Image (spheres, grey):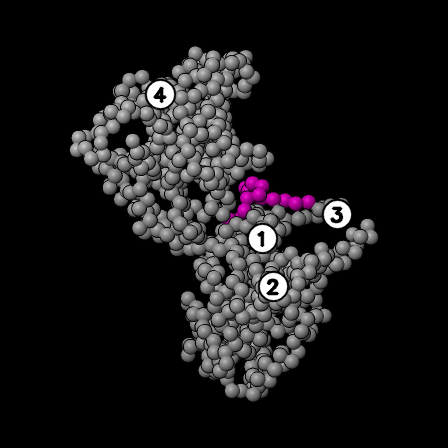
């Protein structure tokens, strides 16, 4: 008898001997005889259906451990589960008198009669999983129940316990070990010969169990490995479980969703979980689904979500689990889909960006240089080993700050972050110096001045440095080759803005103010800030006269300011537009009054070159990345935001004492003011990292003066540090 082609999920590696007279001739039209299969063949076919892969066995064993009330489950795997699967738990264990029938088919502690199915809550109930494992592998069970002085161990094959249970030392719970899985199914074992295939599936399976069963600790590791690939501890928070399994980047980009219906005529269900917001980007949808605490797959629900969503993470599961259909499925899925879409639409209104690597330009000489170093065979030069004290440990093409990896930064809701970092850097790269500049000799002379005084050493440092992070409110840490520098971001940004104003002269885009600002009011604000102590009416009258004079002057110069600098002042003396000097950057509007006063008082309107130079300098000072007016809340400045701030007094003996309002408790903060300050400082640091330094690399020409005026300070050199340590 010729063997029939094997089905994917049922296979029999056995030979059947049949008498010759039972085999009809090949040309016979009589039907073939129906034979009763041997029971061992039946059992192995059934086992192949239940245990299709090693991950299937792991799932069954873990669910048994959960049914046993375990609070800790450990999985050890060897060769992808073909050589060894070991699942240990601290559940209630198995009684000695039950061990003899433990691995027989259809033996279970989950139900005793058919009606029990209506209220069953356990993961399994048919009593087939352990029996199936004994038909395709060697199973050993070690268990101990509460109150026993020792445990028992027994081995099983083909559904039968081979010997009486033997007393042994054991820890609380049960350990089930399966060795040589599919040893008697050559075809199945051959398809699984790449043992690496199933281990990632097992890790993924345990990860999904861990984020749902948060009251249970899970671990999963390879046999002989010191570190677990999954390690979660029991926690009351599902979000904490997700963070421990999938990482911080996933957990911080999740939003909670809830859906329910209590209409018996339609559907009765409750659903809760998490879904990723617009900040989370993934290559494919990952859906993790539990129904009644069972890990399952619902294809209809997954397809409904996929139709309208690109990147979703739901607390649910898609493979290595049973497929289900729901009563009133269409109604339930429609409700869940509408809730998901509504939640995503609301979360898409704002996005938060942490860091992202800039794609190196193919035309960049630095990229070419690095490529040739990576592949010395292309240039024909034999690669040489770089001495340790000259090794560069950062990449200048990566603008993301390395210091931020060690800081916990609160996400900001500032709308300025709503642009994608990729588009920010793309627009910066594309916005090169305009070729069509105004044909004015004075502008060309001013541009030539900073071109001719460019410091070549600093230029190389700026072009090829790595931004590490902010050392304090003013200085940023930069690495260039093996040197570490402090760079004054206020000086750098002011000089960059000045050069960009002259380079983009008469070719600006505009920032439209939400509401026109009256020049007279802005000038009065600036004048009062200059003379805070003065309170007499005579000085106020003088300030009003100065404000009126400057308003009239700026209204007269409005046409020139708009044409050359995109500063729009209407006929009523209202400021309504400002220039875009750096793409994706908006200056601190708290400095507008100071800027307007500078335009009125400090500009030489008679000489063309001096006029353009002084307006450019005023714009540069306005757009420079100054520290916000509110103190930095992350340092000592946090004291500023405490309610009922203490006031110091000095007693007669010269001792200082502090008094605090009785109505406030210690460490209460002005939350609105604190939130405003946090947003302002976070926005500044984001702009420094993602706008300022990429622009410096592309456009900036550092003047010679910056080498000596403290803008750049070298704080460390790797070669010198090595010499110091060698002497020590």
Q: In this view, does 497 lie to the left or right of 339?
A: right
Mark 2: few, some, or many residues within 10 Å (few <14, many ≥20)? few
Q: Do the residues labelled 4 and 1 touch (CB within 8 Å)?
A: no
In the rendering, which numbered label is found on residue 151?
none
Q: Which of marks 1 and 3 is in front?
A: 1
CA gap between label 1 and label 3 equals: 44 Å
Q: Is mark 2 on a helix, strand or loop?
A: helix
In the rendering, which numbered label is found on residue 654?
3
Q: Earlier in the sequence, mark 1 or mark 2?
A: 2
In the rendering, which numbered label is found on residue 377?
2
Is residue 667 in the magenta section? yes
Q: Which of marks 4 and 2 is nearer the N terminus?
A: 4
Q: Which of marks 3 and 4 is nearer the N terminus?
A: 4
Q: Mark 4 points at which residue?
A: 105
Q: Is residue 207 left or right of residue 109?
A: right
Q: Is mark 1 on a helix, strand or loop?
A: helix
Question: Magenta region: which residues?
Answer: 657-671
In the rendering, which numbered label is found on residue 404?
1
CA gap between label 2 and label 3 equals: 77 Å
Q: Which of marks 4 and 1 is nearer the N terminus?
A: 4
Using the rendered view, name the quadrant where residue 123 is placed: top left
Q: Residue furthest right?
A: 727
Where is residue 212? Give x, y as percent.
42, 35
CA gap between label 4 and label 1 equals: 58 Å
Q: Nearer the viewer, residue 341 or 634?
A: 341
Q: Which of 405 and 607 is in front in this view?
A: 405
- Against 675, is 14 above or below? above
Q: Which quadrant is home to the N terminus?
A: top left
Mark 1: few, some, or many residues within 10 Å (few <14, many ≥20)? some
């Amino acid at each position: 008898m010729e063997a029939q082609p094997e089905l994917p999920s049922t296979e029999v590696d056995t030979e059947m001997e049949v008498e010759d007279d039972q085999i009809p001739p090949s040309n016979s039209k009589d039907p073939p005889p129906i034979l009763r299969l041997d029971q061992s063949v039946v059992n192995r076919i059934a086992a192949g259906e239940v245990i299709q892969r090693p991950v299937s066995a792991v799932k069954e064993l873990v669910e048994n451990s959960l049914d046993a009330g375990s609070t800790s489950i450990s999985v050890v795997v060897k060769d992808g589960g073909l050589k060894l699967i070991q699942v240990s738990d601290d559940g209630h264990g198995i009684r000695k008198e039950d061990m003899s029938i433990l691995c027989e088919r259809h033996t279970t502690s989950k139900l005793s009669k058919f009606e029990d199915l209506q209220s069953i809550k356990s993961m399994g109930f048919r009593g087939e999983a352990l029996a199936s494992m004994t038909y395709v592998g060697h199973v050993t069970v070690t268990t101990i129940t509460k109150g026993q002085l020792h445990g028992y161990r027994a081995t099983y094959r083909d559904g039968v316990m081979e010997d009486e249970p033997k007393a042994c030392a054991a820890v609380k719970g049960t350990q089930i070990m399966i060795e040589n899985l599919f040893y008697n199914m050559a075809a199945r074992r051959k398809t699984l010969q790449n043992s690496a295939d199933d281990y990632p599936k097992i890790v993924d399976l345990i990860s999904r169990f861990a984020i749902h069963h948060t009251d249970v600790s899970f671990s999963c590791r390879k046999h002989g490995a010191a570190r677990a690939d999954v390690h979660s501890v029991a926690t009351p928070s599902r979000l904490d479980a997700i963070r421990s399994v999938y990482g911080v980047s996933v957990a911080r980009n999740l939003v909670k969703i809830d859906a329910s219906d209590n209409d018996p005529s339609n559907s009765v269900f409750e659903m809760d979980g998490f879904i990723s917001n617009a900040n989370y980007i993934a290559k494919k949808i990952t859906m993790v689904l539990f129904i009644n605490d069972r890990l399952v797959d619902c294809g209809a629900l997954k397809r409904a979500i996929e139709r309208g969503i690109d990147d979703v993470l739901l607390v649910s599961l898609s493979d290595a689990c049973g497929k289900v259909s729901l009563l009133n499925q269409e109604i339930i899925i429609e409700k869940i889909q509408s809730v998901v879409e509504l939640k995503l639409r609301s979360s898409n209104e704002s996005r938060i960006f942490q860091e992202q690597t800039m794609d190196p330009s193919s035309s960049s000489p630095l990229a070419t240089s690095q490529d040739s170093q990576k592949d010395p065979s292309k240039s024909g030069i034999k690669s040489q080993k770089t001495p340790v004290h000259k090794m560069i440990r950062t990449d200048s093409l990566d603008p993301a700050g390395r210091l931020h990896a060690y800081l916990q930064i609160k996400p900001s809701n500032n709308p300025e972050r709503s642009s994608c970092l990729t588009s920010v850097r793309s627009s910066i790269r594309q916005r090169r110096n305009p070729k069509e500049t105004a044909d004015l000799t004075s502008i060309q002379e001013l541009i030539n001045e900073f071109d001719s005084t460019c410091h070549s050493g600093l230029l190389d440092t700026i072009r090829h440095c790595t931004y590490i992070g902010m050392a304090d409110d003013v200085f940023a840490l930069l690495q260039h080759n093996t040197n570490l520098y402090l760079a004054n971001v206020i000086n750098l940004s002011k000089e960059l803005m000045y050069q960009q104003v002259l380079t983009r002269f008469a070719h600006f885009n505009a920032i439209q103010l939400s509401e026109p600002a009256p020049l007279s009011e802005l000038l009065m604000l600036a004048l009062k800030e200059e003379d805070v102590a003065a309170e007499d009416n005579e000085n106020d009258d003088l300030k009003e006269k100065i404000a009126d004079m400057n308003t009239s002057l700026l209204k007269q110069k409005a046409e020139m300011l708009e044409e050359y600098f995109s500063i729009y002042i209407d006929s009523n003396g209202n400021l309504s537009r400002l220039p875009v000097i750096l793409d994706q950057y908006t200056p601190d509007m708290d400095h507008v009054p100071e800027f307007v006063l500078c335009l009125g008082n400090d500009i030489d309107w008679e000489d063309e070159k001096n006029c353009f130079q002084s307006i450019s300098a005023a714009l540069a000072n306005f757009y420079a990345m100054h520290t916000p007016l509110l103190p930095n809340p992350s340092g000592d400045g946090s004291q500023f935001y405490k309610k009922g701030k203490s006031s110091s007094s000095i007693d007669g003996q010269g001792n200082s004492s502090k008094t605090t309002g009785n109505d406030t408790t210690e460490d209460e903060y002005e939350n609105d003011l604190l939130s405003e300050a946090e947003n302002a400082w976070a926005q500044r640091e984001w702009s420094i990292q993602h706008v300022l330094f990429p622009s410096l690399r592309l456009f900036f020409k550092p003047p010679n003066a910056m080498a000596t005026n403290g803008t750049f300070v070298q704080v460390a050199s790797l070669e010198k540090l090595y010499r110091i340590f060698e002497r020590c």
